[in-house]
Image (cartoon, rainbow, N blue to C red):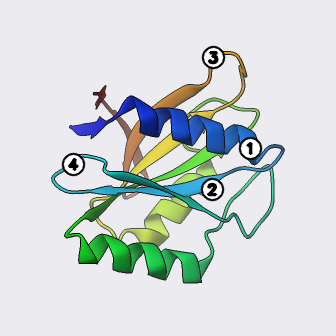
Amino acid sequence: MVQIKQEFVDEMVAHAKADLPNECCGILAGPDGKVMKAYRMSNVEASPYRFSMDPMELVKVDSEAGENDWELLAIYHSHTGSEAYPSDTDVRIAKGTAGLWPDVRYVLVSLMDMDNPSVRIFEITDGTVTEEPFEVV
């Protein structure tokens, strides 16, 4: 089970709000399923409907995580006007990254209700979406 400190949940929500009206995106990294750092990534799509991470930023994050013996635990992004559930596009993207990060999870931050943002974690394998529990510590 992924463990996330409240500060990282708050960071993802703050990032999502800061990037409105566009989707935000980022990486959660750490050892043994425990998030140690949330990396804000640039959404090069600059779109409210999709995201794409800056490849150079991704290389830097992967390098820093490796230096710390951390795994890339999750890719997070926001949905600005829909629920925190992977879209068909999200599932298609997950299929494309499965070879790079087979164990990565997907965190969705929904701002559909700005006063009560929703954060959920999913495993997406071969097009099948499974919600996973996570622990806020």
Give the quadrant of residue 21: top right
Q: Which residue is mark 2?
A: 89
Please name whichever residue, 5 or 49, is drawn nearer the observer in this view of the structure.
5
**On the rendered structure, is 125 left or right of 49?**
left
User: Mark 2 to mark 3: distance in Å?
Assistant: 25 Å
> How many other residues sit within 10 Å of disc 3, few (<14), some (14-19) or many (≥20)?
few
The image shows residue 15, relative to residue 89, as above or below, that is above
Q: Where residue 95 sits in the image (x, y, percent)?
A: 45, 65
In primary-sequence order, the first of circles 1 and 2 is 1
The amino acid on which the numbered mark 4 sits, given as a three-letter code, is Gly
For label 2, the SS is helix
User: Mark 3 to mark 1: distance in Å?
Assistant: 16 Å
Labelled disc at residue 33: 4
In primary-sequence order, the first of circles 3 and 1 is 1
Q: Locate the N terminus by quadrant.
A: top left
Q: Which residue is mark 1?
A: 18
The amino acid on which the numbered mark 3 sits, given as a three-letter code, is Asn
Q: Residue at x 76, y 33 (%)?
A: 81
Labelled disc at residue 116: 3
**On the rendered structure, is 70 left or right of 84?**
left
